[in-house]
Image (tube, coloured by chain):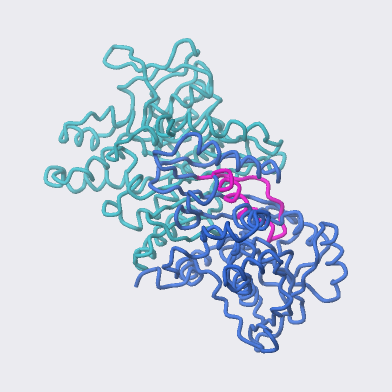
Chain colours: A blue, B cyan
């Protein structure tokens, strides 16, 4: 059996099952959340998140500027730290460079890294630099938090499900990148906005901190693989069901228009596209006003998209008056043999 | 200019110079040592080390068993933590797998990871799993220490330079792997011993801890790139010179015999081969007995190989009565265009 026949989640579960059995008491959250959490004192946790980006798999050199690549390699990890409610503090960066890489190109990658590191006050304290046939960037980010990290497993029946901002925009940006004709039919303003969503996602670090300080989220996750996949992760780990209202999902006008132009489905982009790096969080309905206020302080609206239900209710989508199962297919980095997939 | 025209050390210095300027007060040691060190309280430091292994660059699939590959990917990082005097505690592992990888192969890699994680009580708490044309393994290990980490920069003129065990054995093992005829002329016992040195290096974590607890090392580094390169690193960062006595370098009989059989130079293996993962440390001569006792408690001999000198004396090797410059050429992972190089 080849590993590509297993899904990514099952493969990881299968390979790492034994490792989890030998955790000592310092491990608060191990393999299986956005970030791992180590308890370093009574009320202090160290978070650690890691993401590997491989050329031609997660990015294509002529579709992303080197500064954007550097920026994004850090951003996706900051988003993981944010999903726990933590503050990123330090990072190490391993890069495998093709030998023929121009020094100027490498410098630009580091400019992008520097920009986001300064923006979020992250110290880049080490790494490894090797030669590799493909460009590979693996970033490990450390974060800290003084409260218990928000895991994926705390959602309770009755909790609302909310999203911090627009979704589907990253997939729309990817679709525009892949469609060279699109420059002629989409306005530059709309195009740039969506490309930016895909190439330079903004990690919701400060917004997550605000929510956690206000005691809002019972569970939280960032959207790397799509709304459907993330809600399935929360439900699986919280042993719960959910009902999501398609009409309530925040899909903005740029994304809708672009889907119309390209004859694509914007709802699919939102549910299965991924790489939006917004946060999905659950919270008790009595905290709705507090949640609104916390997000308003960060200039964001609260988008309630559904409700957590008992597990026997399943995980469903309310779509044009019908209730349909909300499969967690999202984008699976392993099963897809199709390199036009959404993870570029 | 292409990055392969710069050495690895210069490339890293060039690309990361600006990142170091914005370090905050938590960064005790940043880019440029075996591991970075973060001060987390008055007398507690968090260490972080990372190493990326790329297929056909650092290993060849048919020359290393999957269990050995898993073991080694962790071992080289434990050695970096050891070089600071720290205790490894947690690790995250990113692996890029070719889609056609057999599940059985991946399981064996994880068996190797599990073995060394159990042996050194390291919690594997996360990682990333992606698809990649080549097998790529990037491991980040966290460690802790309750004393100030031992950097590369603390060596003082008059200090002795010592090595914890045999060197050159890993290069001998690599030479045996690359020479298929060698099976016929080298005894299986000798061959297996040297292959193990290359494929399953033993990180000197406990030995380093013992040395640090006894207050011995003024500077310390692990041997990844060869004795010459590591001594040059210590001298550069300590702003010192050194004299190393070739005859005192601990090169064991297996390595010497193998070099004779293969008509190679065992001294070159020791000085420039690398991947021995023994420790080189410097210490004040008055601590010689204490150093002997600390190592004897770990069943090791103290091998003094030279002396730290004022910087104007340069970095030299005493060889058969002559004094020759000890260039730090070691193995540079970037400059070599030769894929038969020593980093496999």
Residue at 81 percent across and 57 percent down: it is A298
In reply to whether residue B306 is colored magenta, the answer given is no
Q: Camera-side residue: B83 or B226? A: B226
Q: Camera-side residue: A130 or B161? A: A130
Q: Can residue A124 be seen in this view?
A: yes
Q: Position of residue B219 (x, y in %)?
A: 52, 28
Q: If the image is split into quadrants, where does the N terminus of chain A sit?
A: bottom left
Residue at 63 percent across and 70 percent down: it is A270
Could you tell whether A32 is left or right of A212 in the image? left
Could you tell whether A245 is left or right of B164 in the image? right
Q: In this view, does A115 lie above or below A193?
A: above
Q: Is residue A80 visible?
A: no
Q: Main secondary structure of the magenta part?
A: helix
In reply to whether residue A69 is colored magenta, the answer given is yes
| Residue stretch rendered in magenta on the structure | A66-94
Kindly indicate the quadrant of the structure image that contains residue A289: bottom right
Q: Camera-side residue: B225 or A50? A: A50
Residue at 50 percent across and 45 percent down: it is A94
Q: Where is residue B211 in the image (x, y as percent from the top left)?
A: 51, 35
Kindly indicate the quadrant of the structure image that contains residue B186: top left
Residue at 55 percent across and 59 percent down: it is B126
Q: Where is residue B120 in the image (x, y as percent from the top left)?
A: 48, 52
Kindly indicate the quadrant of the structure image that contains residue B272: top left
Q: Is residue A300 above or below residue A116?
A: below
Residue at the front extreme of this rendering: A184
Could you tell whether A150 is left or right of B48 in the image? right
Q: Position of residue A149 (x, y in %)?
A: 71, 61
């Amino acid at each position: 059996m080849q590993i590509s026949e297993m899904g990514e989640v099952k493969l990881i579960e299968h390979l790492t099952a034994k490792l989890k059995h030998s955790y000592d008491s310092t491990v608060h959250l191990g393999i299986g959340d956005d970030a791992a959490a180590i308890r370093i004192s009574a009320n202090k946790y160290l978070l650690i998140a890691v993401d590997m980006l491989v050329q031609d798999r997660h990015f294509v050199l002529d579709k992303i500027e080197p500064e954007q690549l550097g920026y994004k390699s850090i951003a996706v990890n900051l988003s993981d730290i944010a999903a726990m409610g933590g503050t990123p503090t330090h990072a190490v960066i391993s890069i495998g460079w093709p030998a023929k890489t121009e020094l100027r190109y490498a410098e630009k990658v580091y400019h992008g890294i520097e920009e986001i590191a300064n923006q979020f006050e992250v110290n880049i304290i080490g790494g490894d630099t090797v030669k590799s046939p493909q460009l590979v960037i693996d970033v490990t980010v450390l974060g800290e938090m003084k409260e218990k990290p928000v895991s994926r497993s705390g959602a309770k029946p009755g909790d609302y499900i909310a999203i911090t901002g627009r979704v589907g925009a990253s997939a729309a940006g990817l679709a525009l990148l892949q469609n060279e004709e699109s420059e002629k039919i989409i306005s530059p303003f709309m195009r740039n906005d969506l490309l930016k969503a895909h190439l330079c996602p903004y990690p919701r670090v400060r917004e997550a901190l605000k929510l956690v300080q206000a005691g809002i989220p019972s569970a939280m996750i960032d959207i790397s693989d799509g709304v459907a996949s993330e809600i399935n992760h929360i439900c699986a780990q919280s042993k719960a069901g959910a009902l999501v209202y398609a009409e309530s999902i925040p899909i903005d006008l740029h994304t809708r228009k672009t889907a119309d132009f390209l004859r694509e489905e914007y709802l699919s982009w939102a549910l299965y596209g991924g790489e939006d790096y917004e946060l999905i969080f659950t919270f008790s309905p009595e905290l709705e006003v507090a949640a609104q206020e916390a997000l308003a302080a960060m200039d964001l609206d609260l988008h309630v998209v559904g409700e957590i239900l008992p597990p026997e209710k399943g995980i469903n989508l309310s779509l044009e008056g019908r209730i349909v199962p909300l499969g967690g297919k999202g984008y699976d980095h392993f099963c897809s043999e199709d390199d036009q997939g959404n993870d570029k």
